[in-house]
Amino acid sequence: MNGKVTIIAEAGVNHNGDVQKALQLIDEAAFAGADYVKFQSFKAESLVNKTAQKADYQKKNMQGEGDTQFEMLKKLEFQDDWYPLLMQRCKDKNIKFLSTGFDLDSLELLKDKIDFYKIPSGEITNLPYLVKVAKLKLPIVMSTGMADLQEINDALSILLENGVNKNHVTILHCNTEYPTPMSDVNLLAMNQIKRELDVAVGYSDHTLGIEVPIAAVALGAKVIEKHFTLDRTMDGPDHAASLEPDELKAMVKAIRHIELAINGSGIKEPSPSELKNKVVARKSIVASKTIEKGEIFTGKNLTTKRPGSGVSPMQWEQVLGQKAKRDFKPDELITLQ
């Protein structure tokens, strides 16, 4: 991304199993200015057994839809015949297509369709999955929700042991609660990951609003991932913790602003845009009343006022005690020649 923060608009399963909604999500992500629009690729039979219960947030957001993850996920599968249609739409809208594979077959299916693999938080302790990702030889972005530093290090080690270049790995700090309470964000953990594991870092956000991902960019995140939806009131597991299109656009705009603000030289010096204001905002030593030629400059006949085009007040001590070389009127800039 040429040094820019990579912004992933996470459509996920917010298409609700409807390809037309998936196409609309691409349109909105592109309009917002995101770099990637990301979906989720899985077959329910390969992802979850038929008795696994839904998470509490899923039950809350999908009331009356059955209690098992299998029932929920079966309705949200990304269909194989969607790929050409959605990838072409992405090309037409100048946004990159991405999808997370949640099972080994989906990983294989995606290998010639995406720029990098996105490892979801739930797979960070899945050794066969991690080995498969490593063997497919694409860059990797890995989310770390529910994980501690040791688990992250273990997963990273598996990737590296199986041929992944560490420079091709970005690790995302993440909290897997939808929505994440602000008190649980622990954003500085992102910097611990960077410091301890010596990798590029980013942030996958599940809070309400856009403040935290913007803060993450200010702290050095190179990748931001954020769920979005066409309508937060829609029925589905992730809509309630997702941004709506206007919010996604505002987040992207704010991140690009922060990106510009933090990408300066890092040296404290006047910027080109402010140099012209020095003479306007700073002060000079001026006469506080009429001063006649030969009179001694003192704290009683001198003061400091704008503009800053004369003798700097930083020379105050050197000016005191000198004789006026000419007459000065009140408010006139003092000269020493």
Image (cartoon, rainbow, N blue to C red):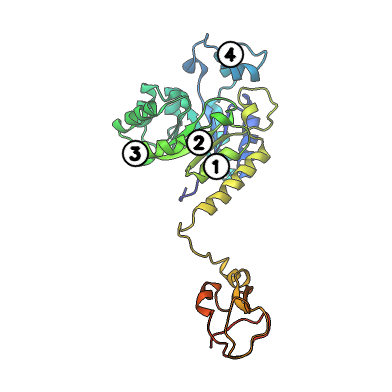
Structural distance between the alpha carbons of marks 1 and 4: 37 Å
Residue closest to the eye, 267 or 121 = 267
Cβ–Cβ under 8 Å for marks 1 and 3: no
Q: Quadrant of residue 248?
A: top right
The residue where tag 2 is placed is: 187
Report x, y in % for residue 163: 30, 34
The residue where tag 4 is placed is: 71
Structural distance between the alpha carbons of marks 4 and 3: 38 Å
Query: Which residue is depicted at the point 57% across and 85% down?
Result: 296
Q: Amino acid at mark 3?
A: Lys
Q: Amino acid at mark 2?
A: Leu
Q: Amino acid at mark 1?
A: Ala
Q: Secondary structure at mark 2?
A: loop
Q: Residues within 10 Å of mark 1 (few under 14, many from 20)?
A: some
Q: Secondary structure at mark 1?
A: helix
Cβ–Cβ under 8 Å for marks 4 and 2: no
Residue closest to the eye, 190 or 277 = 277
Report x, y in % for residue 28: 64, 39
Structural distance between the alpha carbons of marks 1 and 3: 25 Å
Q: Nearer the viewer, mark 1 or mark 4?
A: 1
- Pick whichever of labels 1 and 3 is earlier in the sequence: 3
Q: Secondary structure at mark 3?
A: helix
Count numbered badges in the picture: 4
- Pick whichever of labels 4 and 2 is earlier in the sequence: 4
The residue where tag 1 is placed is: 215
Cβ–Cβ under 8 Å for marks 2 and 1: yes
- The reply, left or right, for residue 334 in relation to residue 329 is left
Q: Secondary structure at mark 4?
A: helix
Residue 166, label in figure: 3
